[in-house]
Amino acid sequence: MKGTPQHVIIAGGGVAGIEAAGTLADLGYRVTLVEKGDEPGGHILQWHALFPDRRPAGEVKSYLRKRIEHRNINIITRTTVEKIRHHGGGVAVNLSGGTEEKADAVIVATGFELFDARRKEEYGYGIYDNVITSAELEEMFNRNRIVKADGTVPSRIGLIHCVGSRDEKVNNNHCSKVCCVTAVKQAIEIRKMLPSCEVFCFYMDMRMYGPYYEELYREAQEFHNVNFIRGKVSEASVNINNRLVIKVEDTLAGRPLRMELDIMVLMVGMEMAGSGMKLAEASGMKRGINRFLETTDHHYGNNLSSIKGVFYAGTCTAPMNITDTISHARAAVAETVRYLNGK
Amino acid sequence: MSIDQANKFGFTINRSRLIDYDASDRKVRDYITAREPSFRLCFACGGCTAACTAGHHTTFNLRRMNTYIRRGEIDPLREEVTRCMLCGKCLLVCPRGVNTRNVVAVAAEAIRKLDRNEL
Amino acid sequence: MNSDLFVIPFNLGLYFILIYSVVRSTIWFRNLSRPDKLRLQRGFFGKPFMDSLKEIFMESLLHRKIFRKNPVLGYMHMSLAFGWFLLIVFGTIEADFFGEKHLNPPSHAIFFRWFNPDHGTEGLAKLYGFWMDLILAFILSGLLLAMVKRFIPGMMGMKKTTKHTWTDRIALISLWLIFPSRLMAESFTCGAHGSGSFLTGTLGSALASFLPAAEIAPFFWWLYSLSLGTFFFLLPVSRYFHIPVELLLIFMRNSGITTGDRHSSYTEVQTHACSSCGVCISVCQMSYAAGINDIQSAYLVKGLRNDRDIAAITANCLMCGRCEEVCPVGIELGPMRLIERRQGEREDRRLRFTERYELTRRRSTIEKEPTQSYGYLTREEPEHAEVLFFAGCMTHLTPSVIVAMKKIMESAGVRYRFMDEKGGVCCGRPLMLAGRDKEARELINHNSDIIWKSGARILVTSCPICYKVFRESYYLEAQVMHHSEFINLLIEEGSLRLGYLHRRVVYHDPCELGRGSGIYDEPRAVISYVAELQSAVQEGSMSLCCGGSLGNLTLSSGKRAVIAADAARTLTIASPDELITACPLCKKTFAQATETKVSDIAELVAAALPKQVASRSKKRPARHPAKASGNG
């Protein structure tokens, strides 16, 4: 590359944004990474271990940290990209706080938000003490302590799949893809930490689509005695002993089943991030039926937006695991470079 | 020789054990699908049955009923449809937006018509 | 004088409709139940009769209710009805006063000008002629509006007009012809004789100046008589039959007759009293929010009148009751629809006789058809309770309501039992809404048994659907209260200490609680006690349906969502902090349809409970009888 390096702005400093920034910087481009939180990293920062091999999340976190230690990368934190518009031959973005930044291209990597479990009122999140989300369970793993709200050790934990996914009642018809394998991973971790605690997964379908996922499912049954019940939990209540009581149909037995639980973990799904939706609204970026950003073609144009000079990376387009997010970010860089070279 | 005895010797198959799809009567299914198209959306999660007010007291299972209808198994249906209280709780639970109350109502209607030879 | 044979069509029509009315009324009367017959007989010699006369004047002639809703539409109806009435009354007086003899046949009053072409050129007669012309002008102005409404409904603030049958069309044409033909007939006669007032006289002399008025006049008198005669003949088979039937309906209603739960003379009278005005269509959310335009009450009634297969219409209704609220004739549309649901299948009248016979024969061979039955329910032995709390099926899907109610009752020191804590039996109302009263009765008996055995004095429920059926169809000693009423009672008697929340909220009246049971004030009193209550665009008796109603069996979830979104938008137009409702079904439906926080009234009150007080209040001595302790 000759002359001053071309400049790319990346909206969102999660896994996709970081990988895209690092790759672009390696290729000699100047990158501005805009992150709304205190530091780049995204959702993985809260995670303890990753599926399918339960490796410490720290390993991937440190990979990502190193990825953006580069003189070509300028990081702006506590800031969001509010609007993208055309400016001269390139693009300009409006940042929160009123400043403006110009660039040759933008990669949108605004990511996802976890489903707000309070929207599924019948599960009692925010109403009953011992109903928690999968993210909160992960924080318990971080603290190496799984306890009920009153500090006692649970003897039975239920993991409820598909909370906020595949559910017309919360306007989400999509599958979030990662929850099934996350549940199996977390079930195993609970069993390892609390060998006397029974663990039940309540699933509608087990979607073990990735390499080593099905093996993990087998491992959970073979070595960790995790129980799987096929049925969607309809509601939860508490009994006189302040224990949770759930109702579900054991669809394989063909009969309704009632079970007491100490802790109920809601495997919350992925939704388009609110900040990304605002950005899309302001910049005229199209969104699909599940509110994620719509790409020009879901086979061969899945990093392309309908706006010139704007590219998409990661879970702002669809639910993805970390592996796919990193691949998707690299592909976004390839598309960006192809565009910049043609300018 | 009764069917049970016959089974002991293993040289006959109890017909009722088998869903003979080609011999089954799917008029009821077609009738229901035409009148309540959302019937097709069921993915058998069992949420309806978990929530079911009647199912708490008796063997009423809407998810299973759905499957029976799809397979053309009408006989188990006959008793089943009469047990629903139409309370509508399942309607609020169904993740696929199946109009469950109407499925029951139309199923009862279909059986009535089947018996009258009007289907 | 020319031949007056032209009066024959009018006379035939008039005597036909008079005789028909008498015969029809007699049949209706004979088919009434004994109590209703007595009611009607008593009413005839008492206050109801006077009330009816007043109501007939205010509603059937002046159309006060339509006037209030829509002044232009009101004027249209008033000018036609009241104008025609005036024309008949003053025409009769005119004929009696100015005619050759007294007690003339009706045709002499109606065709007065024909028989007295030179009348009204001076003095009092001239003044009277002016008055008669004024009335005719009044009617014609309304007719003009009616034509505008027919061809451009939007101009009258109406969204839809009902579709007409062919008899309706001919009746409509003859009705529309009556007054213009009278105008032309009178004008030509006046023009030929140099009489008439500002309308007929002016038009007549203008026409006579270039036309042979005397020769043309009989043509229009024939047209006038024919249109009147045709209209009278078609009256019983057209929608205009509502005009005479409405008078009967008013009298029956004022005598205390109600719709009840099966078809009767009264439902038939109501069916024929519908004017197909279409007001029910314009307020129907199924129409304006979901774009479904063939199931509204006007169509139901029309289907009943014409004996059509209306099963699809009958089932597809939210039963929200908004149409009944605005019906200018006061038809009990909800009960009428329920009767039809109970009735089940109804053969289309258009079936050939042989087809019907075949159908009946085939059906009679079926011994037993599957019907709902709940013999599997076992009797329960409940513990004794002063206050019994019945959450309801749906409320189990909104645990925040249950948790809030528990907190409130504990804070107020109420000793209660939670009747359906582990899941109960449906109240029966959903079955009734589906037209299955007999089956509902089984559930009602089951629950009644538990409530009686508990010895409860108050039965509190969180679900307006249960509330309505507990109040109306259960025979109970316990006082039935919706939780909003119960909370209001606790506040009023001072057993509930609450803080004030600095929130602006809007309240949604659930259909079954508001219009269904008349509970509007208590929830508002409770909300105003703990927060700032904004008023909604459509509230009280015209409150919207959330779209989740169990009243509708066939509506798809997609259409429900559209109705819910529309209703939520209307409710939150003043951007409140929270949308408050008092029904678990409304809560669930709205939660999916709006970004605004949706809460039940119990949650709002629980949020206003001071935390420390909640534990202390338990020790306070109970003041309310409902909370009397075991030794009291």
Image: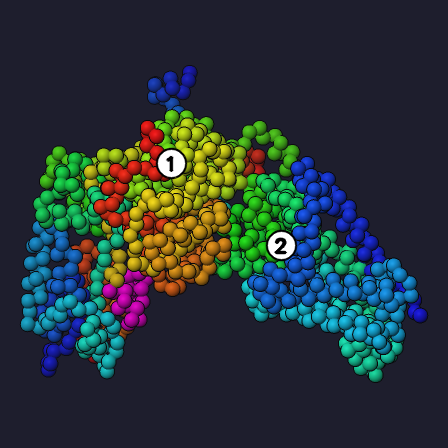
Secondary structure, mark 1, is helix
Subunit bearing disc 2: C
The label on residue C329 is: 2
Residue C54 visible at all = yes
Question: Which residues make up the magenta segment?
Answer: A275-298
Q: Quadrant of the C terminus of chain C?
A: top left
State left or right for residue C309 relative to residue B109: right
In terms of image quadrants, where is residue B48?
top left
CA–CA distance between discs 1 and 2? 45 Å
Q: In this rendering, is residue A260 above or below A26? A: above
Secondary structure, mark 2, is loop
Residue C9 visible at all = no
Q: How many marks?
A: 2
Q: Quadrant of the N terminus of chain C?
A: bottom right
Earlier in the chain: of badge 1 and badge 2, it is 2
Say which residue label 1 marks: C625
Q: In this rendering, is residue B105 above or below C140? A: above
For marks 1 and 2, give the one nearer the viewer: 1
State left or right for residue C428 relative to residue C180: left
The label on residue C525 is: none
Residue C627 image point, x, y percent:
34, 36
Q: Main secondary structure of the magenta part?
A: loop
Report the residue at 78% width, 70% height from top. C132
Report the residue at 13% width, 49% height from top. A139
Examine the structure image and report whether residue A291 is included in the region drawn in magenta. yes
